[in-house]
Image (spheres, helix red, strand yellow):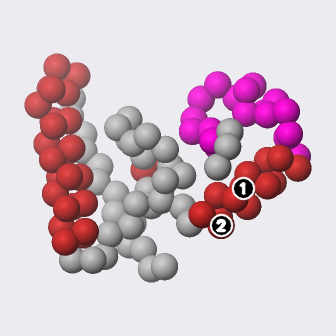
Amino acid sequence: MNVLVILLQVYWDNSKDDKKVLPIVEAWKEWTTKETKKRGIHSDYIYLNYMGNTEDSPYTGLQRKSLEKMLTVQEKYDPDEVYKNLWKGGHKLPSHA
């Protein structure tokens, strides 16, 4: 799979402008998704460090075999999900694939 990763960085000074700026960012993301799907070049993959607050999971765009491998490693080294439960932030692997 060939993937081009694009980062859109938007800065603004006043948090009061969130309601103005964030919908523009979302509209851009929706437009790019629609366009890439229309052209047959879309990938659901989102680079983990570029995920925003609106994405559900960084794992939706992974190939199934990659997710299965990560779950196999987790099961081998952390079957009781100790590290998953101790780490309070971030995106966790799903409990069941």
Q: Amino acid at mark 2?
A: Lys
Q: Looking at the image, which residue sits at the far top? A: 16
Residue 10 is situated, as x and y percent measured from the top left of the image, at 24, 44
> Which is more toward the observer, 2 or 49?
2
Please tell me how crowded label 1 is: few (under 14), some (14-19), or many (20+) other residues with Cα within 10 Å: few
| Residue at 45% in and 80% down | 2
Magenta region includes residue 96? no
| Residue at 24% in and 69% down | 36
Q: Amino acid at mark 1?
A: Met
**Cα–Cα gap, marks 1 and 2:** 9 Å
Under circle 2, the secondary element is: helix
| Residue at 60% in and 63% down | 64
> Which is more toward the observer, 49 or 91?
91
Asked if residue 90 lies left or right of residue 4, the reply is right
Location of mark 1 (residue) = 70
Dominant SS in magenta: loop
